[in-house]
């Protein structure tokens, strides 16, 4: 039995809201790393290097997207769809189609887990070091 999804609305592009959420969660991660682990000396330098790596990790795909948008063929005009419509459509992956909501969760879950986990670690460390807890 073939369990591949068949839908007339198949998307191969990630909705801009999902991309912006990834960027926001990355900024959240770096911010909480600074809040929780910032200290005098080499620690600040190390955090600056890590923040730079995250900046590059965000900037390179953003620049590539802008170059692609500027140089795409005229027949590939952008289709603006609502986020709700994107979630209800299917998303084409290398291994087949999945629902848009499932694709969004699979894209956002790893960075969200790391960002919120860092928030927890940093908050506990900050409160412990400053004698609040």
Image (tube, rainbow, N blue to C red):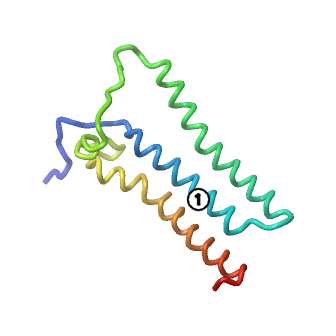
Viewer-closest of 59 and 95: 59
Residue 96 position within the rendered picture, expressed as x and y whole percent measured from the top left: 29, 45
Q: Point out the image quarter for the N terminus.
A: bottom left
Q: Residue at x 43, y 54 (%)?
A: 108
Q: Is residue 36 above or below residue 75?
A: below
Q: Residue at x 41, y 46 (%)?
A: 18
Residue 46 position within the rendered picture, expressed as x and y whole percent measured from the top left: 77, 59
Viewer-closest of 133 and 17: 133
Residue 49 horizontal side relative to residue 23, left or right: right
Q: Which residue is mark 1?
A: 29
Residue 128 is drawn in which quadrant? bottom right
Q: In the displayed image of the protein, which residue is found farthest to the right?
A: 41
Q: Point out the image quarter for the C terminus.
A: bottom right
Q: In the displayed image of the protein, which residue is found farthest to the front?
A: 132
Q: Is residue 53 above or below residue 122?
A: above
Q: Is residue 74 above or below residue 122?
A: above
Local packing at callout 1 (Cα closer than 10 Å; few below 14, some 14-19, many 20+) is many
């Amino acid at each position: 039995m073939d369990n591949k999804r068949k839908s007339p609305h198949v998307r191969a592009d990630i909705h801009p809201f999902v991309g912006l959420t990834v960027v926001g969660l990355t900024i959240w991660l770096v911010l909480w790393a600074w809040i929780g682990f910032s200290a005098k000396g080499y620690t600040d330098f190390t955090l600056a290097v890590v923040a730079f790596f995250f900046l590059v990790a965000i900037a390179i795909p953003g620049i590539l997207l802008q170059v692609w948008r500027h140089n795409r063929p005229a027949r590939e005009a952008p289709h603006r769809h609502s986020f709700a419509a994107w979630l209800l459509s299917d998303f084409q992956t290398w291994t087949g189609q999945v629902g848009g909501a499932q694709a969004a969760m699979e894209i956002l879950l790893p960075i969200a887990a790391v960002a919120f986990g860092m928030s927890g670690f940093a908050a506990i460390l900050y409160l412990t070091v400053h004698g609040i807890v």
